[in-house]
Image (cartoon, rainbow, N blue to C red):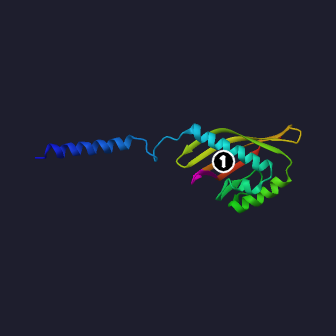
Amino acid sequence: MKSLLQIGCIFVMLGACTASQGENTDENAQPDLVQIRTDIETLENNWAIAVNTKNIPELMAFYADDAVSMPDDSPMLVGKEAIRKFQEKQNLSQKLTHSFETIEVFSEGKQVLEVGKTTMKDSTGKVVGSGKYMALFEKRGREYLCIREMYNDDAK
């Protein structure tokens, strides 16, 4: 016959196992979408500054080395170097100011999907174009890096 101490230990261990399955741990905790959205909006504001100042090194800091970009009317760009070459050609020739607006944010584990829209203005501030995008970010270390993106302009 088991002693009361043994039976008590079994119940304590079972209780601990049951509690740990239902508790929020880092692996199954619900993401803080308010904070994640704030982080992504801050990232997008900094992204816009880099695009508008034609700061290609700063812009490229937002991309992971293994990123894939699917721009409007262009072939898929695989890797940071291919994206850099495209951005240099694209951004240096444009005279527009871009702004980005986050519409939705979804999160699963270390990845965040952002759905947003873009507005382009000329030097007088007149809206001359708009578009939409989806960007998949992954938290690597302490920062989110873009690992996949696709974007296109709205019809003129």
Q: Is residue 154 left or right of residue 13?
A: right
Indicate the position of residue 155 as horizontal and vertical percent values.
80, 41
> Hey, which quadrant is residue 125 in on the image?
top right
Q: Left or right? Give the position of 94 relative to 143.
A: right
Q: Which residues are magenta?
A: 138-145
Left or right, 12 with respect to 57, comes to left
Would you name the residue on which mark 1 appears? 135
Q: Examine the rendered structure and indicate whether residue 42 appears above or below residue 76.
A: above
Q: Position of residue 113 (x, y in %)?
A: 61, 45
Q: Is residue 120 visible?
A: yes
Any magenta on residue 139? yes
The residue positioned farthest toward the right in the image shown: 124
Q: Amino acid at mark 1?
A: Ala
Residue 2 versus residue 83: which sits nearer the camera?
A: 2
Q: Main secondary structure of the magenta part?
A: strand
The magenta stretch spans residue 101: no
The percent coordinates of residue 65 (x first, y second) are 65, 60
- Horizontal side of 96 relative to 4 (left or right) equals right
Picture residue at 69% right of the left edge, 60% below the top: 80
Instruction: Name the residue furthest left.
Output: 1
- The residue carrying pointer 1 sits among few (fewer than 14), some (14 to 19) or many (20 or more) residues within 10 Å by Cα, namely some
Residue 9, quarter of picture: top left
The answer, for residue 105, to whether it is visible in the render is no
Which residue lies most toward the bottom here?
81
- Residue at (76% x, 56% y) in the render: 56
Q: Position of residue 37 (x, y in %)?
A: 62, 40
Residue depicted at 54% across the width and 39% down the height: 32
